[in-house]
Amino acid sequence: MGYFQIITSDKLNRGTEPEKMKDDQMNKRPEELPNALAQMDKILESTSGRQICLFLDYDGTLTPIVSNPDEALLSEKAREVIGKLSERITVAIISGRDRKDVSAKAGIPNIIYAGSHGFDISGPDGLEMAHASGETIIPALDLAEKQLREKLGSIEGVQVERKKYAIAVHFRNARDHVLPHIREAVSEVLNSQKELKKGSGKKILELKPEIDWHKGKALIWLMKKLQLDRDKYIPVFIGDDVTDEDALSVVKEDGVGIITGSHDQTTAASYRLEDPDQVIAFLEQLKDRLLTLRD
Ligand SMILES: O=P(O)(O)OC[C@H]1O[C@H](O[C@H]2O[C@H](CO)[C@@H](O)[C@H](O)[C@H]2O)[C@H](O)[C@@H](O)[C@@H]1O
């Protein structure tokens, strides 16, 4: 039986508008940020001797963006380096994908997987968290999925991807002239489903539970649940998309936030990496440096 814990830490209470505006104004364009590969010494210094816990996005961060979501597969090299890191530090993949999907695609044992943007978490030693109001959200998602398939199923290049706690409508392979129709169909479905809200990402529109929960809150939840206290542990988050900004905001003050590539907004990250190849190179360097520190 899963459960859902409401967290009331200072970080989570930072969502008030004036505070959020201040945060947004501090955001930068990814190209203004230093490259994390060149800043490994500075990044390690900023940990002040605390142990890193690593939170990774999947699509666009660990794997390049591809036109068919099912073909976003993790390289053996990535699997190996993340596996080795997980022998030394806590590693979690926090993805917009369905948890079972991202866990099967990554295929790394003994790490934490958080799917549907952190609504569905599972990990070693019986770690489980599923949203308590799933009973009410799932029927709404089932109905929305049916409506979307009816409205969009016949449009070439549109893919409706059902996850346990969200639905993604992919339009990467659709012609530009059908985009207004896709947006309208999503809006119509959302107007009839008050339990759901709109999200967005790289060439996708999403329907998600109308609940104040996201990757950043999942990161904080995990740190509390695993007793990774900030005096001994420091989070590093790497992500590429707008949904990763919630987690990048959480680690901005005391942590390391790295944006991979770019999206269409400014970022709360402090460092950048160009692409998933650079992410894997960074993780490789991090693994080597952690080994040196231990020896
Ligand atoms: O949080 P993430 O792990 O980055 O997941 C975000 C979404 O990733 C997938 O879609 C994206 O990647 C696809 C494969 O490269 C690409 O075809 C699509 O255009 C991208 O939006 C996934 O399919 C979604 O469910 C995730 O929400």
Image (cartoon, rainbow, N blue to C red):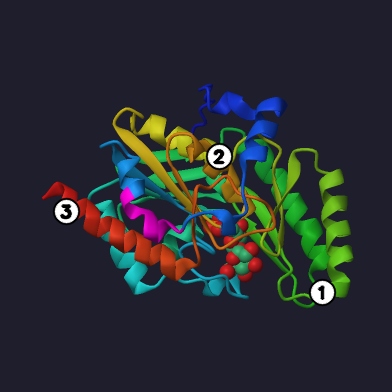
Residue for badge 3? 292
User: Helix, strand, or loop for circle 1?
Assistant: loop
Q: Say what amino acid the circle numbered 2 marks.
A: Ser
**Percent position (x, y) of residue 25?**
67, 39
Q: Is residue 107 visible?
A: no
**Percent position (x, y) of residue 255?**
42, 39
Which callout, 2 or 1, points at the residue further toward the start of the chain? 1
- Is 184 on the left-hand or right-hand side of 18? right
- Give the foreground label among 2 and 1: 2
Residue for badge 1? 155
User: Helix, strand, or loop for circle 3?
Assistant: helix
**Percent position (x, y) of residue 14?**
60, 27
Vertical placement of 4 versus 177: above or below? Answer: above
Q: CA distance from mark 2 to mark 1?
A: 37 Å
Q: Nearer the viewer, residue 286 or 176?
A: 286
The magenta segment is 35-41
Residue depicted at 57% across the width and 70% down the height = 65
Residue depicted at 31% across the width and 46% down the height = 44
Where is ligand 1, by quadrant? bottom right
Q: CA distance from mark 3 to mark 1?
A: 54 Å
Numbered mark located on residue 195 in the image: none
Vertical placement of 183 versus 54: above or below? Answer: below
Residue for badge 2? 249
Q: Say what amino acid the circle numbered 1 marks.
A: Ile
- Is 144 on the left-hand or right-hand side of 42? right
Q: Residues within 10 Å of mark 3 (few under 14, many from 20)?
A: few
The residue lying furthest to the left in this view is 295
